[in-house]
Amino acid sequence: MRLLTPVWNYVDALVHPSAQQDALMAARHRAFIAPRLLGSFAALASFPVYIALRGVPSALELGVFGWLVAPILIAYFLSRTGRYESAHVMSSLSLTGLVAVVAWCTGGIGSFAAIWLVVVPLEAALSASRRVVALAATFALAAAGLLLSLSAFDLQPPATALANEHGALAALAIISAALYATGLAFGAEQLTRTSAGLLNAEEERYRLLARNMTDVITRHGRNGAVLFASPAAEPLFGVRASELAGHGLFDRVHVADRPAFLTALADAAALGEDRSVEFRIRRNSDAEPHGGHFAWIEMRCRPLDPATDAAKCGEREVVAVLRDVTERKVQERALEIARKESERINNAKSRFLATMSHELRTPLNAIIGFSDMLSNDQIELDPAREREYAKLINDSGRHLLSVVNGILDMSKMESGNFEITLEPFAPAQAIRSCCDILVLKAQEAGVELKTRIAADLPEIVADRRALNQIMINLISNAIKFTQRGGRVSVSAICDGPQLVVAVEDNGVGIGEADLLRLGEAFFQARASYDRRHDGAGLGLSIVKGLVRLHNGDMDISSRLGAGTRVTVRLPIDCEGVRPAVEPIKLVTERAREFSAAANMQAKKSA
């Protein structure tokens, strides 16, 4: 074998560059070149031995040995051009010509050489081309027909010395043809083995690719039935790929997405065009073997083979690639929620500017206007009018101060810098004091203010100033939005470990759409079409922030035209339910709420 290594290396070097990239085609080139070169050179090398044994050769014998140059030239032609089928046709034609000439000179169709015509199509079979085999068979049959015709019309040359040795030569011809055919058979077997090895290697590469791909590849009939699913289906869907066969995949698709799933497959099969669709599919897990959850899948499908006859009849199959896009969907949903949150913040800024332009400009105009009148020496004012103007300036200043304080308090709460000081005190006395402060305002508005405070209210541990601000804001709002002749009631009871304070009125009430937004900074119910009531829209948002600082809860129930009820629940011992007197970072809470909302929305959409 080592002696033949240089020979095989030389044969490999003769393979045309166009065939070297394809292992099977390179093997076919080597199978064509090697036997022709080796056989021809071996036969030519034996020519001196043949002369020594036979004596002076005849013209026919010289012609046969001269023909041995033809296979060498054909092999060189293939090596230079890479035209594999053309080389086979040339080889079949040259062999047919040699056999026909030798047979014509040695007895016609009955010659010992005629048996070699059978070898011509067998040699062409190694080309793996029907066209080449058909041409080789045509050459052999034409040669046989020509020999028959020549024999029938007695157009053969005189018998030669070779013809007189017919028996021995016939045996030699049969043996040599059998040996040549055996060589062809070994070549065919070698090519088959090479082809099978390459096919197995290619299949192994595809199997390796299919096992390690995260995307699932499926093949579908036109009705959506799965004919094949790659091994990646198991980690993606939580089931074996075999369980998706038939309508197993369709049964796992979310009911609402099944029409889109089938439409994409049907369009790809009927129209011969690529289609893409996203749908939800049930995914099993070890924790949920029978239930599972839904995941978002992106499927890109295309016709498998649009050139087949079945495809022309509208029955083409579809190949699809399925990919998990759940994470992308969650991110898209989070971005959508973030966009809406950004819009809400921008709207809040717009409301802030609109509200503050009114709430700040009105008292400032009053302060500047009345102070100008008081400081103008050319205008004579009596003492009563001066006191009236001074009172208006004072009221406007206090109103302006309350607005600024509200903004500062809200800012502190949102930044987490609003601190509460916990101390024990009697809540009943604090609530009555707030009612006493606002009873005059209620009388001026023509509103009846009633209190129902339980006699057995215990002391609570909370921020007294914060409770006063909560009650004053709630009672002020109730009086403000209650028509003359209306009623506002304040009640307080103890419900287990909580103090429950309720402020109820029978005023204008709140619409259902606005009720969901109450507690947002600078938002006023019906603010877009009703500005009969003054205010910056900070009262309820401050109350909500103070209640949350105490780890409490606020609930609002209302009906348009029937009144509003605000219920505040505070722990009796705020110090016991909260680890330390520490400001609550509302911004952090909002970020967590936003993240939770994004995940919840993504699960709902899935």
Image (tube, rainbow, N blue to C red):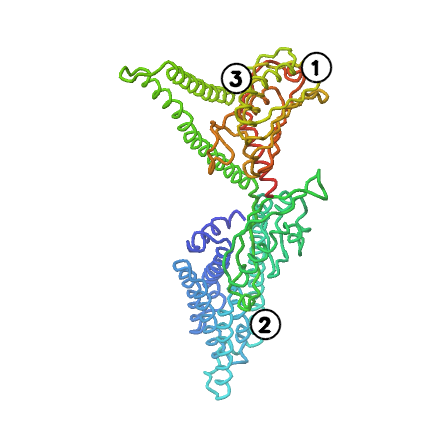
User: Callout 2: 10 Å neighbours few (<14), some, many (20+)?
Assistant: few
Q: Where is residue 346 in the image (x, y as percent from the top left)?
A: 44, 33
Q: Label 2 belongs to which residue?
A: 171
Residue at image coords 60%, 24%: 449
Mark 1 vs mark 2: which is more N-terminal?
2
Q: Position of residue 18 (x, y in %)?
A: 42, 55
Instruction: In the displayed orientation, state which residue is furthest to the bottom.
Output: 153
Label 1 close to label 2 by CB (< 8 Å):
no
Q: How far apart are marks 1 and 3 (CA)?
A: 26 Å
Q: Label 3 belongs to which residue?
A: 418
| Quadrant hosting residue 396 | top left
| Side of 494 where 601 appears, left or right | left
Mark 1 vs mark 3: which is more N-terminal?
3
Q: Label 1 belongs to which residue?
A: 458
Q: Where is residue 28 in the image (x, y as percent from the top left)?
A: 50, 58
Find numbered disc 2 in the image and state the secondary structure of the residue it sits on.
Answer: helix
